[in-house]
Amino acid sequence: MNIDSWKSQLRKGAAELAVLALLNHTPSSGIALVKRVEPYPNIGLSGGALYPLLNRLEREGKIAGRWSSETVGRPEKAYEVTPDGKAWLAAMREARTFFDQDMNAILEAKA
């Protein structure tokens, strides 16, 4: 395995957390969400990876999408976090905090 493969695996684990956190701040369409993650290239969320994730999160009831006819041209689907998604996000944040604490302790260990 090379470093790019490892980084890809790392991003896959973080993508759901990133999307839920961003949508929790501000509901967004898929295209708007792609633009919102552009400043964070290390997260690695392209449209090709984002839309399947949005579909899965919606199927699982963690986000809800609504079609808007108020846009010019093609209708857009805006996504927002559901109550189940908010609970899942809180659990993920807590798990990540504990993971980070343990990983930092391991990486900083001198023995």
Image (cartoon, helix red, strand yellow):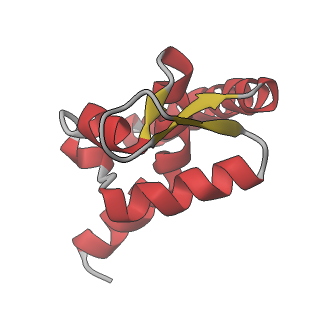
Which percent across, then down, holds residue 55?
60, 56
Which percent across, then down, holds residue 101?
54, 29
* Farthest residue, direction top: 25
Residue 111 in sight in this render = no
In terms of depth relative to the viewer, which is nearer, 28 or 86? 28
Q: Residue at x 24, y 47 (%)?
A: 42
In terms of depth relative to the viewer, which is nearer, 65 or 111? 65
Quadrant of residue 98 within the rendered picture: top right
Which percent across, then down, holds residue 89?
67, 29
Q: Is residue 19 left or right of residue 63?
A: left
Instruction: Indicate the quadrant containing the C terminus: top left, top right, bottom left or bottom right.
Output: top left
Q: Is residue 36 left or right of residue 62?
A: left
Q: Is residue 109 left or right of residue 52?
A: left
Residue 2 in sight in this render = yes
* Farthest residue, direction bottom: 1
Instruction: Indicate the quadrant containing the N terminus: top left, top right, bottom left or bottom right.
Output: bottom left
Question: Where is 61 relative to 50, above or below?
Answer: above
Q: Residue at x 43, y 27 (%)?
A: 70
In terms of depth relative to the viewer, which is nearer, 30 or 20? 30
In terms of depth relative to the viewer, which is nearer, 14 or 104? 14
Question: Where is 78 relative to 45, above or below?
Answer: above
Q: Is residue 90 left or right of residue 87?
A: left
Q: Residue at x 69, y 48 (%)?
A: 58
Q: Residue at x 73, y 32 (%)?
A: 85
Quadrant of residue 90 within the rendered picture: top right
Q: How many marks?
A: 0
